C-alpha cells in the first residue's frame, strides 16, 4: 500500500485531513458573496484547503477562479491570467468562451490545440505596456463581474499569496483594486496569505487600502481529535497498530503544523512497516530523522548566519520560550548588547529562519531545525 501521508504539494481527497468546519464556513461566506482574508502561519494548509474547497465547489457547479500571485512577476501577467481564469470559470462552452475572450479590449486571445488533439487551450496576451497594465487588470475584473451578472452565476475568485500584491508597486494598485472589488455584487473573494508575510499589516493598518474590506478568517491547527482519527484510519488500513495516547506526541513534536505532522507520519508509516506497529520510541525518533534528511538545507542557513546569530539560534533551540531581549537571556547565554540581539533577530526573520508569533515569541520557522542544531553542538 502506498504511503498515505503526503506532504509538500497539494493534498486532495482521502489524503486531506478534516477541515470540515473551515470548509463549511468558507462556503457560507461564498453564499453571502463576502470577502474573506484567510490567514495562518506558513504551512498550515491554506492552499490545500482552497484546492479541496474548489473540488467541492466544482461538484456543486459553482464557478471558481484561482490565482497565485507568486506565479505572476508583474501586473501585466496577472491581468492576462485573471481575465482568462474568470472567463473560463464562467463560460464552459468552448465556442461561447472564444467569443467572450474576444470581447476584451486590452487583450488578444491566442488559441492552440493541445497535444492530444481534442482540447483547445487559450491564453490572453495583454496588448498594453506594463505601465498601463492596471487598466487591463481592472478591465478583466469588471468584465468578470458583468459576465457573472449576465450568466446569472455567482463567481468565486481565490487569490493565494495575496500579500505579494505589494511587490507590484503598491498604493495606487491597492486602492484601485479595493474600489473595484467593493462594487462587485456577483463575485465572492477569498484572499489567502501567511501570518509571517505582510498580509496582516495590509489588513490592520487603517491607512492601507484593504483595511476592513472583508472578514479575517484565521486558520488554526487541525483539530487534534479529527486529525488523530484520520491518522488512525490510515494506519488501520495499513494493518499497523499504535497506542492512541502515543499519537499525542506527534502533535506536540510537530507543534500542530499540518506540514510537520504529515512529514512525521510519512516516516512513521515507513518505520512501522517492519513490525506493523508504531511504538513511542519510533515517534520520539521522528524529528531527528527529518532534521538529518534536511541537513543540507540547514547547513546553508547556518553558513549565512553570523556568530551572534548562531548563538541566538543555539539558545532558542534549547529554550524556545525565553525572550531573546530579556535580561535573563543575555545573562544565561552571555549575549549582548540588546541592540545587536535585536538586529540579529531582524536579520534571522528576514532570512526566514525565525518568525515572531503574535504573542511576541521568536520561533524557528522549521521546527526540526533545533534538532539539527542539537546534533551539531
Ligand atoms: N488538511 C490537511 N491534510 C493533510 N495534509 C495537510 C493538510 N493541510 C496541510 N497539509 C500538509 O501541509 C503541507 C503544506 O500545506 P499548504 O501548502 O496548503 O500550506 P499553506 O498554509 O498554503 O503554506 P504557505 O503559507 O507556505 O503557502 C501540505 O503539503 C500537506 O502535506
Ligand atoms: Mg500556500
Image: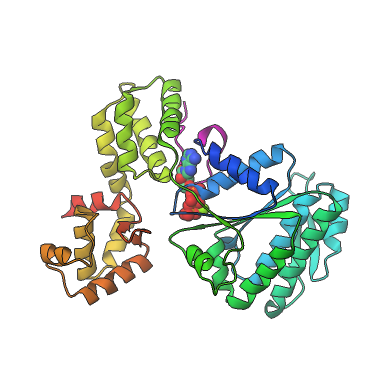
Residue found at x 61% / y 65%: 72
Estimate the x, y position of residue 77 in percent, counting from the top left: 66, 67
Q: Is residue 81 left or right of residue 196?
A: right
In this orientation, does residue 90 appear?
Answer: yes
Residue 41 drawn in magenta: no
How many labels sit on residues?
0
Q: Is residue 310 left or right of residue 20?
A: left
Residues rendered magenta in the picture: 1-16
Estimate the x, y position of residue 162 in percent, counting from the top left: 56, 62
Q: Quadrant of residue 109?
A: bottom right
194 is higher (above) or lower (below) than 137: above
Q: Is residue 131 left or right of residue 357?
A: right
Estimate the x, y position of residue 252 in percent, counting from the top left: 31, 40
Residue found at x 49% / y 63%: 200
Residue 3 drawn in magenta: yes
Residue found at x 27% / y 72%: 342
Q: Residue furthest top?
A: 239
Q: Nearer the viewer, residue 274 or 371?
A: 371
Q: Is residue 179 left or right of residue 375?
A: right
Q: Nearer the viewer, residue 128 or 220?
A: 220
231 is higher (above) or lower (below) than 11: above
Rendered image coloring scheme: rainbow
Residue found at x 31% / y 61%: 300
Estimate the x, y position of residue 210 in percent, counting from the top left: 59, 67
Amino acid at each position: 500500500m502506498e504511503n498515505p501521508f503526503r506532504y509538500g504539494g497539494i493534498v486532495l481527497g482521502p489524503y486531506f485531513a478534516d477541515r470540515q468546519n473551515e470548509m463549511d464556513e468558507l462556503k457560507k461566506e461564498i453564499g453571502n458573496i463576502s470577502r474573506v482574508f484567510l490567514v495562518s502561519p506558513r504551512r498550515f494548509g491554506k492552499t490545500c484547503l482552497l484546492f479541496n474547497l474548489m473540488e467541492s465547489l466544482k461538484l456543486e457547479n459553482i464557478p471558481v477562479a484561482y490565482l497565485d500571485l507568486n506565479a505572476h512577476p508583474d501586473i501585466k501577467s496577472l491581468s492576462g491570467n485573471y481575465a482568462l481564469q474568470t472567463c473560463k470559470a464562467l463560460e464552459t462552452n468552448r465556442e461561447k468562451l472564444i467569443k467572450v475572450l474576444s470581447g476584451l479590449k486590452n487583450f488578444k486571445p491566442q488559441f492552440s490545440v493541445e497535444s492530444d488533439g481534442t482540447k483547445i487551450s487559450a491564453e490572453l496576451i495583454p496588448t498594453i505596456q506594463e505601465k498601463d497594465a492596471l487598466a487591463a487588470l481592472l478591465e478583466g475584473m469588471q468584465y468578470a463581474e458583468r459576465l457573472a451578472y449576465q450568466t446569472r452565476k455567482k463567481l468565486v475568485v481565490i487569490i493565494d499569496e495575496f500579500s505579494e500584491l505589494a511587490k507590484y508597486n503598491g498604493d495606487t494598485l491597492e486602492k484601485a483594486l479595493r474600489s473595484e472589488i467593493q462594487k462587485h455584487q456577483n463575485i465572492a473573494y477569498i484572499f489567502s496569505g501567511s501570518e509571517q508575510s505582510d498580509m496582516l499589516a495590509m489588513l490592520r493598518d487603517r491607512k492601507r487600502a484593504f483595511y476592513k474590506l472583508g472578514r479575517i478568517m484565521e486558520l488554526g491547527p487541525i483539530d487534534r481529535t479529527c486529525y488523530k482519527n484520520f491518522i488512525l484510519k490510515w494506519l488501520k488500513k495499513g494493518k499497523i497498530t499504535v497506542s492512541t495516547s502515543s499519537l499525542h506526541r506527534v502533535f506536540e513534536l510537530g507543534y500542530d503544523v499540518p506540514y510537520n505532522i504529515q512529514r512525521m507520519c510519512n516516516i512513521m508509516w515507513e518505520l512501522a512497516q517492519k513490525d506493523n506497529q508504531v511504538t513511542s520510541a519510533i515517534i520520539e525518533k521522528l524529528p531527528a530523522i527529518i532534521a538529518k534528511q534536511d541537513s543540507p538545507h540547514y547547513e546553508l542557513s547556518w553558513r549565512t548566519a553570523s556568530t551572534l546569530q548562531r548563538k541566538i539560534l543555539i539558545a532558542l533551540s534549547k529554550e524556545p520560550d525565553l525572550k531573546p531581549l530579556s535580561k535573563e537571556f543575555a545573562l544565561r547565554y552571555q549575549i549582548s548588547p540588546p541592540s545587536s540581539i535585536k538586529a540579529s533577530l531582524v536579520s534571522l526573520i528576514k532570512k526566514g529562519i525565525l518568525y515572531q508569533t503574535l504573542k511576541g515569541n521568536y520561533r524557528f520557522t522549521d521546527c526540526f531545525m533545533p534538532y539539527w542544531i542539537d546534533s551539531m553542538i
